[in-house]
Amino acid sequence: MSALAFMKRHYDEMAALRQDLHAHPEIGMQEYRTSDLVARKLGEWGIEVHRGVGGTGVVGVLRAGNGAGSIGLRADMDALPMHEASQLSYRSTTPGVMHACGHDGHTTMLLGAARYLAETRHFDGTVNFIFQPGEEGVGGALAMLADGLLERFPSDALFGMHNRPGLPVGAFSIAPGLAMAGGAFFDVVITGKGAHGARPEDSIDPVLVAGQLISALQSIVSRNVPPADVAVVSVTKMSGGDAYNVIPHSVTIGGTVRCFKSSIMEQIKTLIARTADGIAAAFGARAELDFRLIFAPTVNDLRHAQDYADAAAELVGETHVDRDAQPVMGSEDFGFMLEKVPGAYILAGGGDGAAPHHPLYDYNDETTPYGAALYARIVERGLPRRNAP
Ligand SMILES: [Zn+2]
Ligand SMILES: [Zn+2]
């Protein structure tokens, strides 16, 4: 039976599992029930289970034959801190927590692939099923890497996937290189000297410094980043001052940086620090930068992106695979893993429906057979079984 036929045969079971996860969402790094369920299922299917990898992460290891090759398949498990607005029978039972990004579906797809590969073992080598906690900006990928994910479970290549509403079910889309931007958050605390609003001569005015700094930060991209590279610096927050007649002691501004290259992220960080220091100094104030890298850029390796697209085309036909998707300014922490091991990240069509992070979003169960079969086929194609002697 083909991988896709297997997944379609088990459709009802997988949909029920996904809807159970949907009804019991857990916030990033607190996926206790979810990781229990994942570990139990993997164990039931005879897969070696490792728990507590980077907090609530789970890794399943499946070997077949004695090939030295290895492939890692990664799915995320966490939900978001938001209220679900739907009236679905399986809507969130935890107030203020919702599977609004479809990670319930990603977990289910990877479980489907694990089950199929454990039952059929039409491959030669090792598969690592990586169930990652905390993808939504709370450091789950880095936690797994810090816990020795790649040393304990070495993989020659890593493959990840995200559902994509707006792309038809059964269609796939992949970028041949840069896929998603890297993202950072920053705060700059500007400290001056408070005074009466009518006596500016007694002050070092941090509000004035903040105004100059916000304008100057806009020259970082326009005058320093090569125009062929894409980058965004947005100041999105300011706070400081409580009264009409008081010059405050300090002001804080904050924002986000998005770009596609780690070297440019480093450059922008250095330039924000230099600009803040220099402008503050010119006014006799001080500036302190807190710069936090939240997401690495997600960059697909060309060969692995092609392998992924080839496997997808075999499943659904070439006309349903976009091999030349444009990069997006959104971010994904799988990028940190792809910085260490080559691999690729693909989008699986989710059909009509609300966009991720919308209170009415619901992962489309129809996506599961295609995504699960693709995970399985990238293993079977990448670790082919040798013919019997
Ligand atoms: Zn999300
Ligand atoms: Zn997501």
Image: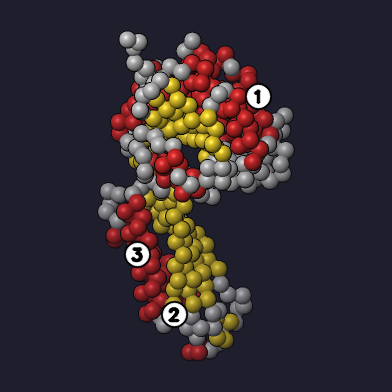
N-terminal of the two: label 2 or label 3? Answer: 3
Q: Indicate which disc residue 324 carries.
A: none
Kind of residue at badge 2:
Ala
Q: Nearer the viewer, mark 1 or mark 2?
A: 1
N-terminal of the two: label 1 or label 3? Answer: 1
Q: Position of residue 317 (x, y in %)?
A: 39, 17
Asked if the residue at label 1 sits under 8 Å from ligand 2, the reply is: no
Q: Position of residue 33 (x, y in %)?
A: 66, 38
Relative to 355, does residue 234 appear above or below in the rendering? below
Q: Indicate which disc residue 16 carries.
A: 1
Residue 259 shows up from this direction: yes
**100 or 244, which lies in front?**
100
Total marks shown come to: 3
Give the Cα distance between marks 2 and 3.
18 Å
Reading the image, the residue beneath label 2 is 285
Asked if the residue at label 3 sits under 8 Å from ligand 1, the reply is: no
N-terminal of the two: label 1 or label 2? Answer: 1
Residue at coordinates 36% horizontally, 24% vertically from top-left?
67
Q: Residues within 10 Å of mark 3 (few under 14, many from 20)?
A: some
Q: Position of residue 344 (x, y in %)?
A: 38, 34
Q: Position of residue 160 (x, y in %)?
A: 45, 34
Q: Residues within 10 Å of mark 1 (few under 14, many from 20)?
A: some
Kind of residue at badge 1:
Ala
Residue at coordinates 43% horizontally, 16% vertically from top-left?
122
Q: Secondary structure at mark 1?
A: helix
Residue at coordinates 51% horizontally, 69% vertically from top-left?
252
Reading the image, the residue beneath label 3 is 271
Q: Secondary structure at mark 2?
A: loop
Kind of residue at badge 3:
Leu
**211 or 312, which lies in front?**
312
Residue 306: quarter of image: top left
